[in-house]
Image (tube, rainbow, N blue to C red):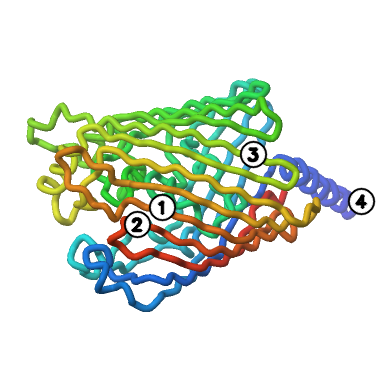
Amino acid sequence: RIEDKMKKTLIELILSIVSFSAITAQGLSVGGYGEVAMSRNFYSDNVYRYSNPTKYKDDPSHGRFDIPHAVIYLGYDFGRGWSMQTEIEFEHTGTGSAVEKEFTEAGEWESEIEKGGEVALEQFWLQKSFKSWLNLRVGHFVVPVGALNNAHEPLNFFTVYRPEGEFTIMPSTWHDTGISLWGDAGRWSYEFQMIAGLDAFMFNRDNFIKYGAASPYEFKVANNNGFAARIDNRSIKNLRLSVSGYYGNSMHNSFPNDLRDTRYKDVKGRTWVGSFDFSYKGKNLIVRGNADYGHVGDAVTISTIKRNMTSNNAPYKKTPVGQSAVTYGGEAGYDILGRADEKLYLFGRYEYYDPYMPASDQQDYTFTDVHRIAAGINWLPVPQIAVKAEFSERFRNERYNNEPSVSIGIAYMGFFK
């Protein structure tokens, strides 16, 4: 009968859909990470606190609540070595018009669309895997230079906020578009990337090259290319040793590319960063550390051009870029519970960083030189969730006030499928 045939066809259709969904779901991966943070800062937030530290020594404390990162991973394995991955990040609850008090312009209030709160596509790539030691990735991906960029998820560090040293002087999370070749070979792993070069006009005194990977436009300027690499070794049980770095010309990598003063046509702005980091994970003990150094060629000339030859309404900070920047630090945590399903780490961290190390003919700004200590706890009631609490303090040059704070936070990371 026609009715029976229709029922049979409908059942077959439903079974086909269920079968297709099951097959599709097998290749799908979903995950993410996120953080909620609260802090009380027992120091002044006045824009002149470094130019006149005595005046603001006894200012009241100030507090902040924040959601630094909320990230969604979506990936799919197509089979036959082909896969894709996306990572969508919401920073500081999203994007919009941010209001800030501009330190470099006499404390004026400015309202602007900026990267302070954003929705960003941090990863979007297609990959062909030939062997475990040979994979080709094309698209937008993380640049694994330094300890933080390589392991930026919140359960990979003890502090409530990301470690300040690398977060201050380098893009974080550093992500860019290009081609990546990577693989694992026994106890060694490697990655080599060709990406869009950094923009020297986005460098500044307080953050070195941090914003050089960002673009205020709907596209990424790539008049110059950059090259990044990372090598990891795990020959010693529980220990990873890693070196990573970046190199590329950063001058004439802005838009529009019309710097017509021929005096500067040969300025390259050669920029390089070298980094060493390690991680030890034993039964109850975790120890991590890093050391990073960066250098910008033609820093004096770049600073002069930014100050005198770029428009006042251009999206560049007018502060100079230092010739070099440095950071080093480490943290250690000990699990006092010793259980497989629940952890309670007591931790301590020290780091030093200076995003502005001037050339001999540049003005020095001693407040950029920072030592920071932090101590606290990380409680992991389950392996994917951490509740964090810490006391920290920044120590600058002796003429400036110390900057103590207390922070608490909760974070998660993991794949749900």
Q: Marks 4/3: CA distance?
A: 71 Å
Nearer-N-terminus badge (2/4): 4
Say left or right for 171 vs 289. Answer: left
Q: Which residue is mark 2?
A: 396
Disc number lying in front (1 or 4): 1
The numbered mark at residue 311 is: none
Based on the displayed image, in which of its 4 quarters is residue 107 positioned?
bottom left
Nearer-N-terminus badge (1/3): 3
Based on the displayed image, in which of its 4 quarters is residue 130 positioned?
top right
Judging from the image, what secondary structure is the residue with disc 1 in? strand
Q: Which residue is mark 1?
A: 371
Say left or right for 164 vs 59. Answer: right
Q: Which residue is mark 4?
A: 1
**In the rendered view, would you say 236 is above or below 387?**
above
Q: Marks 2/1: CA distance?
A: 6 Å
Residue type at numbered disc 1? His
Q: Marks 3/2: CA distance?
A: 30 Å
Q: Position of residue 175 (x, y in %)?
A: 45, 42
Q: Marks 1/4: CA distance?
A: 84 Å
Residue type at numbered disc 4? Arg
Judging from the image, what secondary structure is the residue with disc 2 in? loop
**In the rendered view, would you say 224 is above or below 407?**
above
Q: Are marks 2 and 1 in contact (CB under 8 Å)?
A: yes
